[in-house]
Every structure is written in structure tokens, then in C-alpha cells.
Amino acid sequence: MAGKDLDPSTSPRALLGAELRVARERAGMSQAELGEPLFVSGSFIGQLEAGTRRMHLEYARKIDEILGTGGFFTRNCEAAAKSKYPDHFAAAAEAEALATEIREYAPQLIPGLLQTEAYAREVFRAYQPTATEQAIDELVTNRLARAALLSDPTKPLFWCVLDEAVLRRCGEDPAILAEALRHIASLVRSHRIIVQVLPFNAGFHSGMDGSLKLMSFADAPPLAYVDGIGMGQLFDDPATVAQHGLTYDLLMASAMSPRKSLALIESVAEDYEHDQHA
């Protein structure tokens, strides 16, 4: 039987994954062998064990049955599933925190990991114009907590392609966008992130369907995440992830060089600082 019930305050998903690995190895099963009766791949089991995938209740019940763990995973599944993020994004946000490399294409907005407090607040207010200030405060706090991921000086590697529309989409106060762009420029100049801008004159390109996030891990297969309005999907199928990887490679090829991108970002920021935007 697996160990005692998990403490929800101490990374329950990672602990649950560690317990799954112990229980599986004790049963003498490979990841692929455990995945077969669950109708998932061995790599999916690996992602559960690494904590990059959430264990849903139906899997927990079946795992308890297969491994003879006395309801341990069923009992702890609810604790491990708790998240401060929306359901469609929770799995991606929690995987993001474990990634060694993140590559992202942003077609409309500055990515969450790069947003300033004022920019995030303006974005959330646009999404939810009737929400209370308390609700907006909570959303902003959670987004800034995600952004703290980049406080580590070396990891994860973060490489982003920004559509030029991201640089030009301004709210009521141009100073907010100027501050946000200066923040990105500061991260680039400190060699913490790599940013390229995909200019309008690039024409049609491979990422016109929407945003894309690619995540690589030290001990689990890579993941791809795509999203839309109130929805998102996390992919682990190798062929699908590889296809999204090609999409990102094509975006990089169409984008401006990092040096020219930085110059454009700082130039646009200066325009907004002087309220000279078109």
C-alpha cells in the first residue's frame, strides 16, 4: 500500500506522482503496462509521476484497483487537483512551473509570465468588466506569482515570439503598455529571456490559428498547450507535439532577429511614453 495521505499544502501533485512511481515499481509494472488498462500511453503515466499531469478521479480509482493501494490515490486525488487557475489552464500552469524550457508564441497579448501588475490588471478587467475588485486582485496576484518563475537567474529557458500586434495593442493608458514593454526589454537586456517580434510585414504565417506554448522537462516528455477564449488543450502525443514544434520553428524563422526585436520593443515603448502612438 502507498504511504499516508498527502498534505495538500506541500505540492500534492508532485507527492502523488512520487507515490505512484513507488507503487508501480513495487508492483513490478512498467509505465506502459500501467497505462494499457487505463487506455493512456506510458508517457502519460510518466507525466503523472513527474507531476506535470493532473491525476483525474477516474484514473485514481483504476490505479488503486490495479496496484492494490487501498484507495490511497482516490482519497488524495482531490487534494492534488486543487488549483488557483481556471480548469482549462490549470494543468498547463502547473506543468509550466516544472519545465526546463518554455517556448511561447503570443499573437495578441504579452504572455502571462512577462506581464506587469498594471498590464495584468487592465487585461483581467477587459475580460471581466463586471467582476469585483477583490476578484480582479486575486487574478492579478496569481498571475504575478506565475511570473516569479523567471526570478531564477538561469531556468527555465524562456524563448518568446511576440506578434507585432502585442506591441501595438494599447488600453486607455499608454503608460501601462510602455511600462510592460520596458519590463520585457529589461529581461532581454539582462539575458534572462529571448524575444523575437513577428512583424506585420511577415504576412501570412504558421501561427495564425492562435497562441502556442511548448514545454520541455528534465524527466518527462514534452508538452504543447494551445488555448482560446475560456478554453485550452494540453497535448502529450509525440506527433502532435512535434507538429506544434515545427509551427514554432517556422514562426522563429519569420520573426525579426532578437537584436532588431529589442530595438523595436524599446522604440515602441518610447512612443507610448510620449503618447505618440497612432
Image: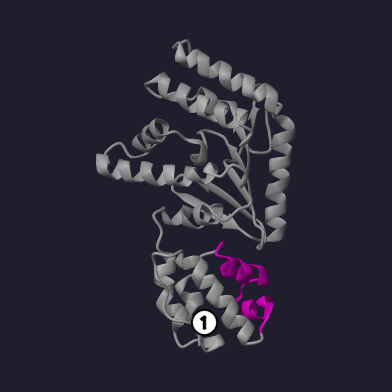
183 shown above or below 237: above
Question: Which stretch is magenta?
Answer: 29-52
Residue 125, percent from left and from top? 34, 35
Q: Secondary structure at mark 1?
A: helix
* Residue toward you, 165 or 97: 97
Kind of residue at badge 1: Lys
Residue 130, percent from left and from top? 26, 39
* Magenta stretch contains residue 51: yes
Residue 253, percent from left and from top? 75, 33
**Residue 237 lies in what quarter of the image?**
bottom right
Taking the spot 69% from the left edge, 29% from the top edge, the residue there is 255
* Residue toward you, 98 or 172: 98
- Whether residue 199 is visible to the viewer of this picture, yes or no, is no
Badge 1: few (under 14), some or many (20 or more) residues near its Cα, within 10 Å? some
| Number of numbered callouts drawn | 1
Residue 250, percent from left and from top? 73, 38
- Whether residue 34 is visible to the viewer of this picture, yes or no, is yes
* Residue toward you, 270 or 224: 270
Taking the spot 51% from the left edge, 51% from the top edge, the residue there is 232
* Magenta stretch contains residue 219: no
Question: Label 1: which residue?
Answer: 62
Q: Is residue 21 left or right of residue 250?
A: left
**Residue 44 lies in what quarter of the image?**
bottom right
Magenta span main SS: helix
Taking the spot 50% from the left edge, 86% from the top edge, the residue there is 69
Q: How is the image coloured?
A: one colour
